[in-house]
């Protein structure tokens, strides 16, 4: 009986992706549909982050990457940007101790340019404090854009070539991948986007080469364990081929 239970648990864990990436979309539309200011939607979006991180730990997800602020978001109204920056600061100040206690490791990717120095300091503090934690790695994509990340990696390789450390023939997908912000993070098996939009919006373009996508109609503030479980069930029902044939395929 014990062996049977162990096998059942192992089978259940095998269907859970190691790394789930999420495009948290729809805060503003959630608020507008209720006649509320967009800022309220962003605040409720933070509550959804808290629910989702807790659920990720409970469900056995090892890595979770959240697209919290893109490099294109700077084009939004200044008041909304200020509100988003303030929410990020409050999230770290309020939740860091609890995340640390829960064994969450904080990892931040994205450009540091133009970001409030106080916020940068808080993110560095969170990363350093939680560096040894192992329950879940929470990757926060902040001021992040995948095209810029790939260009930065290519620039690093070019600089290495100029210094004579490599020649062009040395460049492989693995070598380029090692220059990305996510070099220490496995590629996501599952990417979820809320709000009904069906696009990547410059998020993890390189890393998502063989990722399964699940697009949900729900706005991000309504997201939590149930919708995460729904996405995981859809992922579990798929056969990942990586360009080859599954054992069930006849073509």
Image (spheres, grey):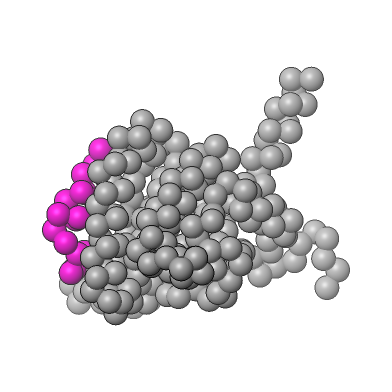
Membership of 179 in magenta stretch: no
Image quadrant in which you'd find residue 243: bottom right
The x and y percentages for residue 147 are 37, 77
Query: What residue span does the magenta drawing correspond to?
Result: 111-131
| Dominant SS type (magenta) | helix
The x and y percentages for residue 114 are 18, 69
The tally of labels here is 0
Membership of 114 in magenta stretch: yes
Where the C terminus falls, by quadrant?
bottom right
Where the N terminus falls, by quadrant?
top right
Foreground residue, 247 or 25? 25
Foreground residue, 162 or 229? 229
Foreground residue, 188 or 85? 85
- Identify whether 76 is placed above or below 238: below
Left-right relation of 166 to 134? left
Q: Please report the residue visible at 34 percent of the width from the left and 46 percent of the height from the top.
A: 106
The x and y percentages for residue 85 are 25, 61
Q: Please report the residue visible at 76 percent of the width from the left and 62 percent of the height from the top.
A: 246
Q: Residue furthest left?
A: 117
Left-right relation of 94 to 194? left
Q: Residue furthest front?
A: 35
The x and y percentages for residue 9 are 68, 33
Left-right relation of 62 to 248? left
Image quadrant in which you'd find residue 3: top right
Q: Please report the residue visible at 68 percent of the width from the left and 61 percent of the height from the top.
A: 240
Q: Residue furthest right?
A: 250
- Identify whether 17 is placed above or below 246: above
Say whether residue 20 is visible: yes
- Identify whether 141 is placed above or below 1: below
Q: Please report the residue visible at 36 percent of the width from the left and 31 percent of the height from the top.
A: 101
Say whether residue 18 is visible: no
């Amino acid at each position: 009986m014990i062996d049977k239970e162990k096998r059942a648990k192992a089978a259940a864990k095998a269907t859970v992706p190691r790394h789930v990436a999420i495009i948290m979309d729809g805060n503003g539309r959630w608020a507008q549909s209720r006649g509320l200011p967009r800022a309220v939607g962003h605040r409720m979006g933070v509550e959804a982050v808290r629910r989702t991180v807790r659920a990720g730990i409970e469900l056995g997800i090892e890595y979770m990457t959240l697209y919290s602020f893109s490099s294109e978001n700077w084009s939004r109204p200044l008041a909304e940007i200020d509100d988003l920056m303030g929410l990020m600061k409050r999230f770290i100040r309020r939740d860091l101790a609890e995340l640390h206690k829960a064994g969450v490791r904080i990892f931040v990717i994205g450009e540091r340019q133009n970001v409030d120095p106080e916020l940068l300091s808080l993110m560095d503090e969170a990363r350093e404090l939680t560096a040894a934690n192992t329950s879940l790695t929470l990757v926060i994509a902040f001021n992040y854009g995948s095209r810029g990340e790939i260009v930065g990696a290519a620039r690093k390789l070019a600089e290495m070539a100029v210094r004579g450390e490599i020649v062009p023939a040395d460049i492989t997908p693995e070598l380029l991948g090692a220059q990305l912000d996510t070099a220490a993070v496995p590629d996501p098996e599952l990417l979820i986007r809320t709000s009904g939009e069906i696009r990547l919006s410059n998020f993890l373009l390189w890393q998502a080469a063989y990722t399964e996508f699940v697009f949900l109609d729900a706005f991000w503030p309504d997201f939590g364990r149930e919708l995460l479980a729904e996405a995981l069930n859809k992922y579990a029902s798929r056969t990942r081929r990586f360009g080859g044939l599954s054992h069930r395929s006849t073509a």
